[in-house]
Amino acid sequence: MRSSRIAVVSIGSTSVHYTVARPSERGLVPVADDSVLFELGSTVDAKGLVPPERLAELHRVLDFYVLVARGMHIAPITTIATEPLRRASNASDVLAAIASQTGGPVHVLEHEEEALLSLFAVLHGRSPAVETLVLDIGGGSSEYALARPDGPPLLAAIRTGAARLTEACIRHDPPTREEMAAALEAARGQVRGTLEGSPRAATMVGGTATNLLRLVAGEARWRSLTRARIDDAISILELTTTDEMIRRRPIRPQRARILPGGAALAAAFLDRYGLDRATVSQGSIREGVILAIARAGNDWRARLSDLVGGAANPSGE
């Protein structure tokens, strides 16, 4: 395993995130972590592409991260992109501009690759003791894996995330009880056709899970989102404006605004599989990429299924 520091930038629906870590025999040693809430997904939803002014803003964000990486003597940066750049009509031009700017490869990940990377970040290539749901509720989509002790993981995604569901169902701040009920019903409809399985444990990764836990935990150092705590989060959301929320909790405004959809999806996934709690992991697809690069170098993407333990054919979205 490589011991040098590795830098990854992730361009997602809600944020642009920069992570640096040093691989070790025990996993990853964090070095740097920063993010800018960018909401590229909503732009692409509205316009179908990344307009010039938004691309200029993205360039400014990436310029900063490239400068930081050079200051740490890390080159090149590996850039990954998810939902917005899978859909933008001018994605090829945007990707070419990003690659020229960062000096490193740009990988537009498929849904199944996102699920594999989350799984790798959580399990580091080991088999779970019991069948386990690993879930990443993003802004525009939600990727998940059913990791099994006796076979390859099952992978799939739904094309609904926290931002997209909030946009579809929530009109008020705070959301009304009727709006939250509609969001939960819509989320249940989205997960109704998810993969068949019988997981006995669950792990959630990513900003939605982390911020839901911040909302209900306060100063407590809880590491799990129980189904009851998600209900508590929904009650808080129905009573608290976004401004009040960010004054009371370490949650950024853009994240706070999309938590209604995130809470509904978290509840729906746990209900779908008959689970009463999920561990909230600090890992993410970025940590998964860093581990994969450390073990496979530039061939990490081609070898991802083997690194994770082999992936079953997904059942689709």
Image: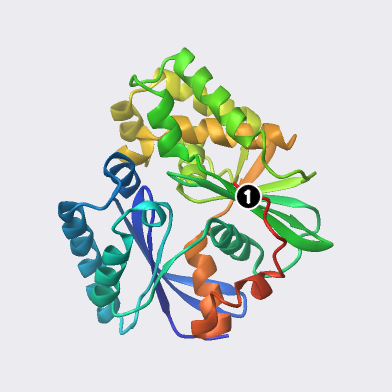
Q: Is residue 219 visible?
A: no
Q: Name the outermost residue toward the right.
A: 150
Which residue does the image show at 26% across and 43% down from the upper left? 47
Question: At 49% across and 45% down in the image, what residue appears?
Answer: 141
Q: Is residue 127 left or right of residue 277?
A: right
Question: Which x, y percent locates residue 227?
Answer: 64, 31
In this rendering, position of residue 51 left or right of residue 105: left
Type of the residue with mark 1:
Gly
SS state under label 1: loop
Tell me the quarter of the picture where residue 121 sits: bottom right
Residue at image mark 1: 316
Front in this rendered view, residue 204 or 219: 204
- Quadrant (top left, top right, bottom left, bottom right) of the N terminus: bottom right
Res 170 visible: yes
Residue lying furthest front: 89
| Residue 310 locus on image (x, y percent) | 71, 69
In x, y percent, where is residue 23?
52, 78
Q: Between 250 and 162, which is closer to the camera in this rendering?
A: 162
User: What is the crowding at mark 1: few (fewer than 14 residues within 10 Å), some, or many (at least 20)?
Assistant: few
Q: Would you place residue 206 above or below residue 98 in this image?
A: above
**Quadrant of residue 120 within the rendered picture:** bottom right
Residue at 37% x, 40% y is 255
Q: Nearer the viewer, residue 174 or 42?
A: 42
> As drawn, is 228 to the left or to the right of 179?
right
Residue 300 x/y as whole percent: 54, 78
